[in-house]
Image (cartoon, helix red, strand yellow):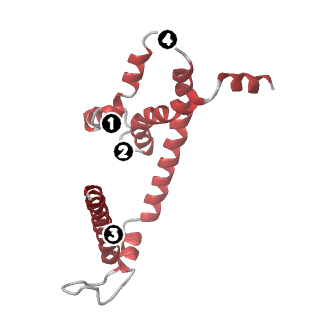
Amino acid sequence: MRDRLWHLALYMFVLGFILNLLGIVSHVVVSAFAKRWFGTPVPPRFTTEWFQYAWTNFDLGRVLGVTVFVALTVVVLALLLGFPAAYILARRNFRGKALLLLLYFLPLLIPQMTYAIPLATTLYRYAIGGTVTGVVLANLVPMVPLAVFILMPFIEQISVNLEWGAAMM
């Protein structure tokens, strides 16, 4: 009996959470397309006027293009820098490896604001703050350790014998 009540309470909590989340998301979606919405359960008219206004007045096409470029550049550079580091950290044992891992993962452990302000100051000192290059470099600071953190377990699972066999082919 007690297990049933516990499961019922858990299911009710999860259901309430999902309904609350759906309510918030649906309100945002409906509000984005509503023309005017005061005092009625459903807006009287729907429009895409707000999206057209934002697209034309805020140059969203260029903004989205730069965003996609920065995201893809950061992903590629983080993988290019992170894969060799993850391989060495996964395959080699050396003195100070634990300390190096701790220092390497520090950007993931401490709040970003503690290094974001000095990083921004440094980027502006070298005149790359506010440029696409500066944005890419600022995003690489937490992304390279994250790439290493994600890649290390996968590299550790690959057998060294498999690597040797592939090298002989």
Residue under label 4: 94
Residue under label 3: 22
89 up-or-down from 63: above or below: above
Comes first in the chain, label 2 or label 1: 1
User: At numbered mark 3, what does the secondary structure look like: helix, strand or loop?
Assistant: helix
Which residue ends up furthest to the left in the rendered image?
39
Q: Is residue 122 visible?
A: no
User: At numbered mark 2, what does the secondary structure look like: helix, strand or loop?
Assistant: loop
Comes first in the chain, label 2 or label 3: 3
Question: For the residue carrying disc 4, how many other residues have a C-alpha within 10 Å: few (<14), some (14-19), or many (20+)?
Answer: few
Question: For the residue carrying disc 3, how many other residues have a C-alpha within 10 Å: few (<14), some (14-19), or many (20+)?
Answer: few
Which residue ends up furthest to the bottom in the rendered image?
44
- In front of the other: label 1 or label 4? 4
Query: Which amino acid lies under the numbered mark 4 shown in the image of this protein?
Result: Phe
Which residue ends up furthest to the right in the rendered image?
169
Comes first in the chain, label 1 or label 4: 4
The image quarter containing residue 98 is top left
Query: Which amino acid lies under the numbered mark 2 shown in the image of this protein?
Result: Gly
Comes first in the chain, label 4 or label 3: 3
